[in-house]
Image (tube, helix red, strand yellow):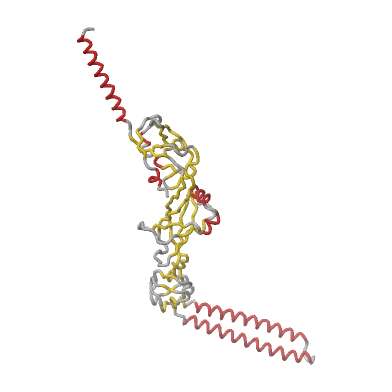
Amino acid sequence: MNLKSFAGSLVILAVAGCSSGNSTNTKKEELPVLPVIQLKAADTSLQQGYVADIHAVQNVEIRSKVQGYLEKIYVDEGGKVTKGQPLFKLNDQQFRLDLAKASAGVASAAADVHATELEIKRIQLLVDKKVISRTELDLAQSKLKGAQARLNEAKALEDDANLRMSYTLIRAPFSGVLDRIPLKLGSLVNEGALLTTVSDLSEVHAYFNVSENEYLEYARKNSKAAAISGSNGVQLILSDGSVYGSKGKIETLEGEFDQGTGSIAFRARFPNPDQMLKHGSTGKINLITRVADALLVPQKAVFDIQDQNYVFVVNTDGTVKMKTFKPRTRIDEYFVVESGLTAGDRIVYEGVQNIKDGMRIEPNMLATDSLMGMR
């Protein structure tokens, strides 16, 4: 080989070497960079939000028990009332007349009883002297029983008239706050007509529905006694996103699941000293679930194939491998792992729809604690 041919060979090798190096660099640059997290077991407190309906501990419609004209209104809409306080007065003239008539009936029946008792005494003397037969005495005693029955009937009518007259003065059944008063003075109030509503807002109940899986998780982590006694505090988020100042306690839950929704209703009680919470308002309950030594997998890292849950596990060389796992429950945006994954596994956190099994990626490790919100 002459010198010129040797020099040409060197140039070709140099060019080939440069081309090979550039190709390797290009492949490295083309590896997708994806966020990756490393699973670790930890005691975790998770907050799960549930839409809640808020009810006063007592909320009663005040309705008229008799018909009459509305004569007086002692209160105003939205006002506070105490137990036994007069609220409304219906015209009671007709009821007074009925009571007077019933009282007269009692007096007449009582007079008949007294007269019959005197007649029995007279007949008893005649029977003792054998002037008349014993049959006359038995007849008089039967008349006395009839008179006493009529007296009892008259007294019952008097009590009924007195009771109906008492219905013309409507009082507050308990201390609370009044709602709207739809009728005005002089209105004819029919029997059963709505006069107003009284709500006891010293405390409120918050009702919220929990899925069966979440209920089972809650039941596992809280003893029955703790669940019923309300030893676990819950937080209420108001409709404007602010946190209610006092924590509540779960008091009870329904005895069966709703067949339509597959959920069960919980009831929490909250103190309401300032009466800021009103009957019929809404909010969100934050239920704290404590999970010991839990492996939490973010929902966005999971994908489904034929009703099975998969994640992409990242190997040491950067290749990803599909791996199925079995979740114990789902809490908020995370799955609690029952089996299939272990602490230390590295999984693709985001972008799983853009990669395939066996593909190689450039891992971008993320801090697990900041993502999981562990505390």
Q: How many labels does the image show?
A: 0
Question: Can you name the residue that lies furthest to the top here?
Answer: 1
Q: Which residue is drawn at 44% across and 50% down?
A: 46
Q: Nearer the viewer, residue 83 or 241?
A: 241
Q: Nearer the viewer, residue 339 or 308?
A: 339
**Residue 245 point in image, percent of width and height:** 40, 61
Residue at the limit of the structure toward the front, as seen here: 3
Q: In percent of the image, x 55 and y 56: which residue is there?
A: 225
- Name the one closer to the observer, 30 or 258: 30
Residue 157, image x, y percentages: 57, 79
Relative image position of residue 27 (x, y in whole percent): 31, 27
Q: In this view, does 19 lie above or below 163?
A: above
For the residue pair 26 and 148, the one nearer the viewer reads as 26
Query: Which residue is pictured at 40% across the width and 63% down the height?
Result: 277
Relative to residue 85, is residue 11 drawn left or right?
left
Q: Where is residue 53 in the image (x, y as percent from the top left)?
A: 43, 58
**The N terminus lies in quadrant:** top left
Identify whether 302 is placed above or below 82: above
| Left or right: residue 201 compared with residue 143 | left
